[in-house]
Amino acid sequence: MVIIGENIHILSKAVSDAINNRDKAFIQELAKKQAEAGVDYIDLNIGPARKNPDVMAWLVEVVQEVVDLPLSLDSTNPKAVEEGLKVAKRRALINSASGKSESKEQMMPLAVKYDAEIIISVLNDQGIPADAEARAESILDAVSYANELGIENERIWVDPIIMPVSVDQKAVREALEFMKMLQDLLPGVKSTVGLSNVSNGTPKELRGILNRTYMVMLELCGCYSAIADAFDEELMALARGQMPEIKDLIRRVMEGEDIDPNGLPPKERDYVKTAKVLWGDVLYSHTWLEL
């Protein structure tokens, strides 16, 4: 899996303070640590940045001084994204556009103007599609619009939008089903997900196992990339093809094999139990690992 490091994120108080104070050293250290952890891209998430869209350019320049990795420019504000694109030394990834009319009209043209790659989510003017088929219909329309602008499939990364398993367990499985059909629908596109979304709202100590298990499931369904925690060492190991026995157990759950988790060592048991929850075989609760 291609990993986009998520750790420079405005929702982190330490990151927010560093951005507001223009603390160059803090941001650079965070970027270097993500690069050392083995990420392929670094995400720069500044949120809407309504008051200071120029902050994206500052971030891009600060990170580029110490890390030679492509950057994902993460903001809902097209002005902020463009400020970052102006100073990016490598082809950047716009994170993100969607099928919403405003996004198609304002964000997608930036990929044309700056020869950037772009994430396009399945979101549309009606909201987040409910199932795999509705996601497919929405993304076909959005990608068609992008193609007409001159953005070829190879520069497009599709985001199915991951819902928290604690909120909408069915949607977690639907995103996997969508991933299975994506290459047949749109040959050449890449795909990515905001991986940590799947564990939002769950107890802190359980978020890692959910994120790691779901990443493997997404990869087995053809997903190309995940925006994820660079400092989760086990997640990074799985992304690099290590721990093949874990991947095999998760695959067997997805193929419908009846595996008794209680006969497995603790780590394997937890991955099997978690895969059963994410696949929808077992109802989610905060205590699924204890059952």
Image (tube, rainbow, N blue to C red):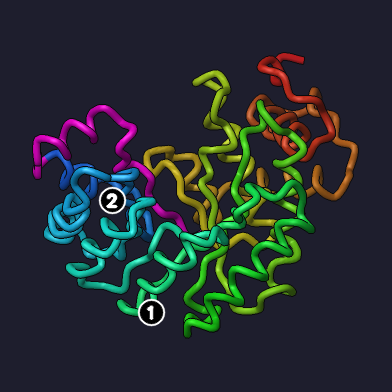
Upstream in sequence: badge 1 or badge 2: 2
**SS at circle 1:** helix
Viewer-side label of 1, 2: 1
Give coordinates of residue 173: x percent, y percent.
Answer: 75, 44
Corner quadrant of residue 268: top right
Give coordinates of residue 131: x percent, y percent.
Answer: 77, 49
**Lateral position of residue 176 relative to residue 263, left or right:** left
Quarter holding the C terminus is: top right
Q: Which residue is mark 2?
A: 36
Q: Is residue 23 magenta?
A: yes
Identified by mark 1, the residue type is Val
- Magenta-highlighted residues: 1-25
Q: Looking at this view, is 286 or 118 the one in front?
A: 118
For the point 54% across and 38% down, the residue is: 197
Corner quadrant of residue 199: top right
Question: Residues under labels 1 and 2: Cα distance?
Answer: 32 Å
Q: Residues within 10 Å of mark 1 (few under 14, many from 20)?
A: some
Identified by mark 2, the residue type is Glu
Q: Which residue is mark 1?
A: 112
For the point 65% across and 78% down, the residue is: 187
Give coordinates of residue 252: x percent, y percent.
Answer: 81, 47
**SS at circle 2:** helix
Does residue 10 lie above or below 192 as drawn? above
For the point 57% across and 63% down, the residue is: 158
